[in-house]
Image (cartoon, helix red, strand yellow):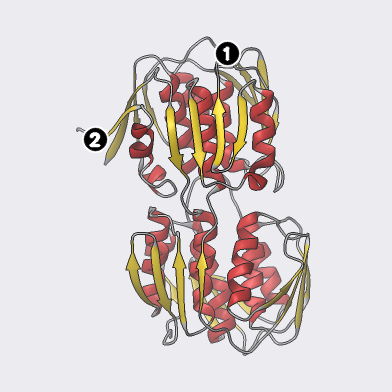
Amino acid sequence: MDQICIIGGRPLEGTVQVGGAKNAALPILAACLLGGGDCEIDHVPQVRDVSTMVKLLQLLGVIVQGQCGKYTLNAETVQSVVAPYELVKTMRASILSLGPLLARLGEAKVSLPGGCAIGTRPVNLHLRGLEMMGAEIQVEHGYIHAKAARLQGARIDLDFPTVTGTENLIMAACLAEGTTTLHNVAREPEIGDLCAFLTKRGAKIHGVGTDTITIEGVRALHGARHWVMPDRVETGTYLMAGAITGGNLMVRGCITDHIGSVLKKLQETGVDLTEESEGVRIRRTGSLRSADIKTLPYPGFPTDLQAQMMALMSIAEGTSVLTETIFEGRFLHVPELHRMGASIEVDGPHAVIKGVATLTGAPVMASDLRASAGLVLAGLAAEGETVISRVYHLDRGYEKLEEKLGALGANIKRMRETA
């Protein structure tokens, strides 16, 4: 098992390129199940979750060609409707095969999803919506088994703006008979990217970017070309890496409109942010100031940047309050930050962070994908050596993170864990 070793204290300087968004690429790849024809997908991040999704699609019968960020997929001959536990257990996004398989083949048998241990994240909203479209669903022996001769358009009001639920129902509705209206949907940019791809394939989708989306069902979708949007979570992670190390960093290739809430909070901490033609530059010359953060559905502050922001606030002057409203189990990184000298008290969904002068390196263990990134940022700022175990979490969502940070001046290396 790999570890990451960091000798902290070096300001990051230079330019880093943002890759394709994992959270956009995964539903787009799943959407290839909705019809035949070649789907050429470019700017796909080379991360483990993408590799897992590709393996799942191949198991279902999709012909996949290409590598290194560019794939051509053809689902013309897809026949299998089973997404097995062996693949689904490692990645929650595998649930995104449910809607397309059911809409295309009339049946889907998908294992209940796994992924990061950051809360319950139930799939009941997905299932309730599909049932309203006429699906018969049974959950037994760890699998969701859904059947429908052809899904029917329906009005669906979501109890919560779930991202994967919104994506699953949009994809299912593309091939349903009649019109489906989804209310209280999530508005994340990755959903917009999925809808852009589906529209290129012949889907009829209206209201993208609002809380109500209408889909007019069609008989079939064809192939299309698509370039995956930049990763806003990777963007925020590198901006915070520049801030926590007191660096001067250009984050290139990002879309600033997607991270408005993040830029606002970073400015509150006292860093200089400049939007330039190629991206965003972040500089920090003085001390960090405390800031209060509350995670919210988009366009609010993203939960996927909560751990990174907590690391940043751990060395800010004053006291910060960080409130997590999306996932109830997303403070598992707090004990690891304690090992590095952070002063954080957790009270339910609130974390009270009293800034310390400096963090100190320590052996720590990653609990989930974004917690891994938060520990990396803490290690970059800490005095001495930090060794992070279980970095396979990190590999699920960040492409060549240690290589990119090393090119910016970080003393960071990957190594095999010793017995």
Question: Whole-percent x and y of residue 322?
Answer: 66, 29
Above or below, 410 relative to 88 = above
* Image side of residue 258 versus residue 284, left or right: right
Q: Residue at x 48, y 55 (%)?
A: 114
Q: Amino acid at mark 1?
A: Gly
Is residue 11 at all visible to an observer of this figure?
yes
Q: Which mark is residue 415?
A: 2
Work out whether residue 233 or residue 116 is closer to the camera in this orientation and state it: 233
Above or below, 120 relative to 318 = below
The image quadrant of residue 340 is top left
Crowding near pointer 2: few (<14 within 10 Å), some, many (20+)? few
Question: Whole-percent x and y of residue 404?
Answer: 37, 38
- Sooner in the amino-acid sequence: mark 2 or mark 1: 1
Q: Which mark is residue 286?
A: 1
Q: Which mark is residue 254?
A: none
* Image side of residue 146 versus residue 319, left or right: left
Question: Whole-percent x and y of residue 93?
Answer: 51, 60
The image quadrant of residue 194 is bottom right
Question: Whole-percent x and y of residue 387?
Answer: 33, 27
Q: Residue at x 64, y 47 (%)?
A: 258
Crowding near pointer 1: few (<14 within 10 Å), some, many (20+)? few
Please identify the residue farthest to the left as the structure is shown.
Answer: 419
Q: Secondary structure at mark 2?
A: strand
Q: Secondary structure at mark 1?
A: loop
Is residue 295 at all visible to an observer of this figure?
no
Above or below, 271 relative to 45 = above
Above or below, 282 relative to 150 = above
